Image (cartoon, grey):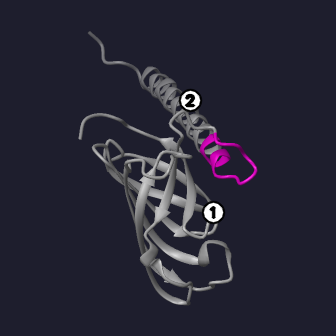
Amino acid sequence: MAPPSLEHVEGKMERINRGQLLMTAIAALVTTTVLSLSMVHAQADKPVASPWAMVVDVVLDPSAGAATSGPFYASGMILRPGAAAGTPPMGTFRSSGYRFDPARPMGGIIGTSSFEILGQGEIVAHGVMDERMTIAGGTGNYRAVGGQADIVALSPTTFRVTFDITSYRGGPN
């Protein structure tokens, strides 16, 4: 059997290179589309669009103290939205960071907040705690969670958190 001609080999390589180029272009298009869609979730004027959205109320312990600039720590209970007084908590809230402007809503705090949901795991959020924080990750059922936490003050010691979760991989702890 005669060896393949140089023209035959070059033609075959050109077809392979075109195929690889097409696959690379398709992968780039899919990646760009997915990234564009995930950016939509982070825009302030967009409604919560997550199929995994979760809303909780947080009631701070009275020991949080007056709002002054400096290091900050708070803890409290996580309740179902609108739960009546005396309702058993569904988790524990802890937050630490630095309060840089007590005149701002929620005290102008930059820090990290932990939302431990009993029996399920923990969601950790980070950023300026005025209106929105980035969900940095989690543990247990929330080990691969991502998105943002929208925060609304209901009173000086109570606030509502809407987790707009854009990525989630559920499962056992």
> Is disc 2 placed on a helix, strand or loop?
helix
Q: Residue at x 57, y 31 (%)?
A: 26
Mark 2 neighbour class, 10 Å CA radius: few under 14, some 14 to 19, many 20 or more: few
> Is disc 1 placed on a helix, strand or loop?
strand
Q: Residue at x 45, y 74 (%)?
A: 62
Q: Read off the magenta span.
A: 37-48
Name the residue at the top extreme. Answer: 1
Q: Quadrant of the N terminus?
A: top left
Q: Does 46 appear in magenta?
A: yes
Tag shown at residue 153: 1
Q: Does 55 appear in magenta?
A: no
The residue mark sitting in front, 2 or 1, is 1
Q: Residue at x 48, y 45 (%)?
A: 80
Q: Nearer the viewer, residue 7 or 36?
A: 36
Q: Nearer the viewer, residue 36 or 91?
A: 91
- Above or below, 155 against 137 in this view is below
Mark 1 neighbour class, 10 Å CA radius: few under 14, some 14 to 19, many 20 or more: some
Q: Which residue is mark 2?
A: 22
Sooner in the amino-acid sequence: mark 2 or mark 1? 2
- Above or below, 120 against 129 in this view is above
Q: What x and y, as percent, mark residue 140?
A: 28, 46
- Above or below, 134 against 6 in this view is below
Q: What x and y, as percent, mark residue 54?
A: 51, 42
- Specify the quadrant of the image occupied by residue 66: bottom right
